[in-house]
Structures are given as C-alpha cells and as structure tokens.
Amino acid sequence: MNMLGLFGKQWGSVSILYFSFQSQLALIFLQWFLNDFIPDHVPEGVFHKVHINESQSTADDVIQSLFSPFERWDAVYFLHIARFGYTYENTIAFFPLFPKLVHYVSFVIHHITFFSLNTTSCFILSAMLINAICFSFSSLVLYKLALIVSNKQFNFANVVLVLFLFNPSRVFFIAPYSESLFSLTCFLGILCLYDDSWNIKSCLFFALSIATRSNGLLNVGFIVHKCLCSMCVSYSHNVKRNKKPPYLSLVWNTMCLVCALSLTVTPFIFYQLTSRLLFCETDNVNQLPSYIISLGKTSNYVLPGTSQASYCTSYEFPYSYVQRHYWNVGFLRYFQFKQIPNFLLASPILLLILHASYEYFIKGNKKDLLVNGQLFRTNHYNTKHFNENYLFSYYLHLLCLSLFCFLCIHVQVSTRMLLSSSPLVYFIVGKYVTQRHYLAKYCLMYFLFYCFVGLFLFTNYYPWT
C-alpha cells in the first residue's frame, strides 16, 4: 500500500482500534522475544510483591512469562493495591480508580475461565487487558481531537495517531500503570468540551481522571476556560446589541462553574478522607491477613490504624504527606547533583514543550492572543470554525504541568506524565512533521528511541520512570 495514500485519507474507528490494539500486542511479544538478551537489574529499596503459594497451570506459566516483565517499579504497587487494598501507608500515593478496575476485571476473568487461572495470573492479565483497551480508545479519541484542531486535515490526524502509537513513554501504556486509563479520561473530557452546550460529561470524565492520578486536578483549568468563554460570548453579544451587561447570565455561569468544579474534585476529596480514616482510626488495626501484617512489620511499613503522621492531627492531605515523606517530593527537593542523569532523561520532552510554549506565547501575535478574542472566544469550542491558534487552554495546561514536573517532583516522571496528560505534545510534533519543520526529524528520533529503549530497560528493571 502506498504510505502517502495511507496518511492522506481518513482512518475509520475500527481500523484505529485494531491498529492500536495490535501495536500493544506487537510490543509485548517483541519484549518477550528479546527480554533474555538483557540481564535483569536488581534495584535496591523497591517495593516487592507478596508471594503466595498457588497452584500453577500451563496457562499460568504462559501468562506470567509473557506479562511478568512488565510488573516493575510502580506496577508492583498498583497490583498490590488491586489485590490486597491499601495495606500500607506508602500505597496512598497511588490513586484508586485503576487498581479498583483491575480488581473487578480480575474477578470476572477468574470466573469466566472457570477458576483455571490462579489469582496472580488473573490480576496481571486484568491489568494488561484494561490498558490495551484504554490505550486503543485513547488513540481513537486523540484522532478525533486531531481532526478538530486541524479542521479535518487527515494527514495531520494520521501522523498524530502514529506518534501516539510509538510515543516515548509507550511502555507505561502497556505495563500495569494508570497512564492508559488517565489518557482516556483526559482526552474524553477535552473532547466533550467541544459539544455545543455546557455538558456535564466533561466534568465526569475529568473527575474520573482525578480518581486515576492526582495531576488530573489541573484539568479543572479546561472547565474554567470553557466557562469564561461562555461569559465573554454572552457579554459581547449584549454589547453589540447595546444592552445592559448580562448580570443574571454572569451569576448563572458562576454558579455552573462552582457546581462543575465541586463535582470534578469530589473524587480527590473523598479519597483523602477515606485514606485518613483508614490509617488514623485505630479500629482498622489487625484487619489484614497475617502475611500482610508480617511483611509490613518486617519492612517497617505503616499499617492501617497505626499511623502517627501529621495528617492525622491536622488538615494536611494524606497524599501530600506520603509524597513528601516517602518520595521526598516538594519544591526544588530534587535539585541534587546525583539527579543530573534524571534531569537529562527528562530534558527532551521539557525542552520540546518549552520551545513550543515560547513560540506560542512570546513569538506569537500577542494582540490576537489577548485582544482579538483568541483567549476567550466561542471558536475555542466550535468544531465548525476551529482554528489552530485557539489552543490557549492546551498550552497553559501543558506549560503549568511541565513547570510542576521540573520544579516539584521526580523529574524523570515528566515524560510519561506529560504524554499521558495532554494531546498537545502530539499536535506539536504532528505539525512539525506535516510542515517539514527542521525539528521534525529530531522529534521522530526521540520518539522512536525512547519508545524501544524504554521498553527493554523498563522490563529488565533498569531506571526508566
């Protein structure tokens, strides 16, 4: 098939889902085939999974041989939470939606296979299946967003799709991490903003993104921007008709915004309250299996009902305490000489976003951006008249998230966090490729190199987070 012809036509939804799912399988089998060529690294101080004696069938051997290399780093936490719940205080760092889904899907798998698979196989198979499905639908939603921002330029949308299929953090969309689910909820939330009317669906999807990852909180910026657009449009219509300022409309939009924000952040508040109750209330002591308690005491983990942390006696969020106490997350805390390799690892994505933001905010036409309505214009969310310049909310969201990654967290996480949180990176590189920008070839090399090298390093337990 002529590749130019393939990139010049629109791909159907079924084809996109098929190619996305096939790419997931292809990378899994590629990893399985080449895994033995790289010796496994043995890291120190990692969270190890609980080993339970179970019967092992041939099917279990195949599943665990194929998927166990992806059970690395944070994946061990997610599978532990899915199977045993929040048994130790350090697990609070991982939000509940993904492990809950894994738990329920593994229950279904266990029953539809007539209990022929052991529990360990059911959980790892559940996580891998959920991620394959979520990634496939994320690809489809991203493709639709690309068509919107480009006024249905199929070549651009197709390039964006391929970039997503081979993105630099690809391994985290395969392994039992929450990136695939988070991308799906974020992309769906953004897509729903383009409905003609104010739609609660967007708030629900953003709420689900917050239940998946804490950085989903930044998605409220899209909701605020949509509301401000509605207010500005209403005001401009009244000015053109020489009417009084629409105070009632202003009050109504403000009330809608407050309700929308309240709905969106509810999962975060609920999770913090339940975490506080679980680890601070002494009634929860000794309600775990003996082997979980034994491992916790051996490893000096804080068990439910035994925490003496500051969040038990103050208004501090348990999540904030855990990130600071166990992972040393905080403003400039990661700025250490020994972390230079991790800053270098994250530098390509951060430099790419910084360059694109500079082009948009500094070199762009400030008059158009601030005065002529590109900032708060109805065309921001009108698919019939969308213009590529109307990406203010995308750029602001991505720039804020990039600065947060650089200044406040483990900087090596930047790649997977940014590429799972926003479609804009794919739009930027897609534009470079379709317009034959001088940075296009460097971006493509970066995408492919990180995609495949990350796959092999991560599955052999080398630092690639």
Image (cartoon, rainbow, N blue to C red):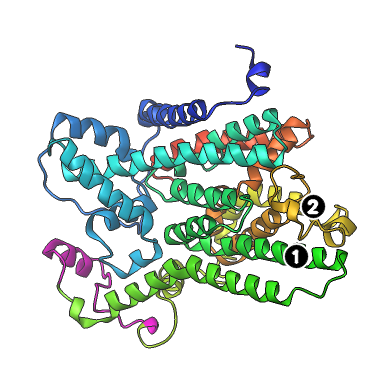
As drawn, the label of residue 234 is 1
- Residue 244: image location, x then y, percent: 82, 75
- Residue 230: image location, x then y, percent: 70, 63
Q: Which residues are magenta?
A: 287-311
Are there few (<14), some (14-19), or many (20+) residues within 10 Å of tag 2? some
Residue identifier under label 2: 360
Badge 1 element: helix
Tell me if residue 128 comes above or below residue 101 in the rendering: above
- Residue 223: image location, x then y, percent: 61, 62
Residue visible at 81% across and 63% down in the picture:
237
Q: Say whether residue 123 is left or right of residue 240.
A: left
Question: Mark 1: which amino acid?
Answer: Ser
Are there few (<14), some (14-19), or many (20+) residues within 10 Å of tag 1? some
The picture quadrant where one finds residue 309 is bottom left
Tell me if residue 236 comes above or below residue 357 in the rendering: below
Compare residues 141 and 110 and report the one nearer the observer.
141
Badge 2 element: helix
